[in-house]
C-alpha cells in the first residue's frame, strides 16, 4: 500500500497527464491540501481516486479533475478575495485558499458547514470563512470579489453573482440542466461580459432557499 503522500503525488501526475493541472501554483496547492481530511472517514481509502465521493446529506465532493479544471480557469492571484457558492466538504475552498488572500464560501446545509469548518481547521487553513446561507444571493457583505466559483449547477448564472464580481473579475461555474451542465467562464470587463464554455460536467443543483437572504445588508 502506498503512503497518502505517494497517492496524492500519483493523482497529481495523473491530472497533469490529462491536462487538468497545469500551473505550478495550482499543482503546489494540490500537493499541500490533504484531501483525505475532507472526505468522510469511511471513504478515506478512495480519497486519491479521480472520482466524486458522497459527503452525506445527498451531496458530493467533486472528482479531483473538476477541482483542478475550475481552479485553473479562475487564474487566482495572491491578492485576490474569492467567493465560492457550495462549500460541501470544504476541499475546493481549501485549494482556493492556498492561492488567494481570503476565501468566503457559502453553504446551505448547516451540517456540511460544521464538517467543512472542522476539516479546514484540522488542515491548518485559516483564510477561509464558511458562511451558512443561500449562495444564490451571493454574499453581499464582502463584495465585490476578484473571483467567484459557483460549485453547484445552475440554469443560468445568477445576475446577483455577476453584480458582486469586480471589473476584470472572473466567474466560473456549471450552467445548464439538472443533471448535465457546461462548465462556463464569465469575464467582466468594462461592464461587458465575455462568456466562454468548456466541457460537459455534472454537478448537484443550486437549491433555492427563500428564507435566508444574504444579499441584504
Ligand atoms: N465544492 C464542494 C462540492 C460542492 S457540491 C467540495 O469541494 O466538496 C455542491 C454544494 O452546494 C453542496 O454542498 C450543496 O449543499 C451546496 N448548495 C446547493 N445549493 C446551494 C445554495 N443555494 N447556497 C449554498 N450552497 C448550496
Image (cartoon, rainbow, N blue to C red):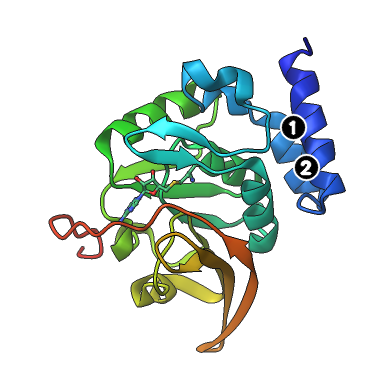
Residue 24 vs 118, above or below: the answer is below
Residue 27 vs 217, above or below: the answer is above
Query: Disc 2 designates what residue?
Result: 27
Q: Is mark 1 within 8 Å of ligand 1?
A: no
Q: Quadrant of residue 19?
A: bottom right
Side (left or right) of 160 relative to 79: left
Query: Disc 1 designates what residue?
Result: 31
Whole-Å distance between the Cαs marked 2 and 1? 6 Å
Q: Is mark 2 within 8 Å of ligand 1?
A: no
Side (left or right) of 115 relative to 44: left
Q: Tell me where residue 144 appears, x and y as whole percent.
A: 43, 67
Q: Tell me where residue 81 appears, x and y as whole percent.
A: 52, 56
User: Is residue 77 visible from the viewing direction of this image?
Assistant: no
Furthest residue toward left: 211
Q: Quadrant of residue 88?
A: top left
Mark 2: few, some, or many residues within 10 Å (few <14, many ≥20)?
some
Query: Residue placed at 49% from the left, 29% from the top?
Result: 120
Query: Residue placed at 87% from the left, 46% from the top?
Result: 17
Which one is in front, 96 or 77?
96
Query: Residue placed at 71% from the left, 37% from the top?
Result: 30
Q: Tell me where residue 152 appears, x and y as whole percent.
A: 43, 56
Which one is in front, 214 or 167?
214
Mark 1: few, some, or many residues within 10 Å (few <14, many ≥20)?
some
Per the rendering, the mark at residue 167 is none
**Mark 2 near mark 1, Cβ–Cβ under 8 Å?**
yes
Q: How many marks?
A: 2
Which one is in front, 215 or 35?
35
Amino acid at each position: 500500500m502506498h503512503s497518502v503522500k505517494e497517492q496524492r503525488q500519483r493523482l497529481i501526475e495523473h491530472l497533469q497527464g490529462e491536462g487538468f493541472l497545469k500551473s505550478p501554483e495550482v499543482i503546489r496547492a494540490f500537493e499541500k491540501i490533504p484531501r483525505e481530511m475532507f472526505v468522510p472517514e469511511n471513504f478515506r481509502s478512495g480519497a486519491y481516486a479521480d472520482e466524486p465521493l458522497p459527503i452525506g446529506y445527498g451531496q458530493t465532493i467533486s472528482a479531483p479533475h473538476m477541482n483542478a479544471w475550475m481552479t485553473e480557469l479562475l487564474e487566482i492571484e495572491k491578492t485576490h478575495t474569492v467567493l465560492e457558492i457550495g462549500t460541501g466538504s470544504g476541499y475546493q475552498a481549501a485549494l482556493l485558499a492556498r492561492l488567494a488572500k481570503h476565501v468566503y464560501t457559502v453553504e446551505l446545509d448547516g451540517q456540511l458547514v460544521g464538517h467543512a469548518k472542522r476539516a479546514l481547521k484540522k488542515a491548518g487553513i485559516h483564510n477561509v470563512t464558511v458562511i451558512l446561507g443561500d449562495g444564490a444571493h451571493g454574499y453581499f457583505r464582502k463584495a465585490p470579489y476578484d473571483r467567484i466559483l459557483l460549485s453547484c449547477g445552475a440554469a443560468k448564472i445568477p445576475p446577483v453573482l455577476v453584480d458582486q464580481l469586480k471589473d476584470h473579475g472572473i466567474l466560473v461555474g456549471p450552467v445548464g440542466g439538472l443533471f448535465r451542465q457546461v462548465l462556463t467562464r464569465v469575464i467582466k470587463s468594462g461592464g461587458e461580459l465575455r462568456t466562454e464554455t468548456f466541457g460537459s460536467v455534472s454537478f448537484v443543483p443550486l437549491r433555492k432557499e427563500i428564507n435566508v437572504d444574504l444579499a441584504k445588508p
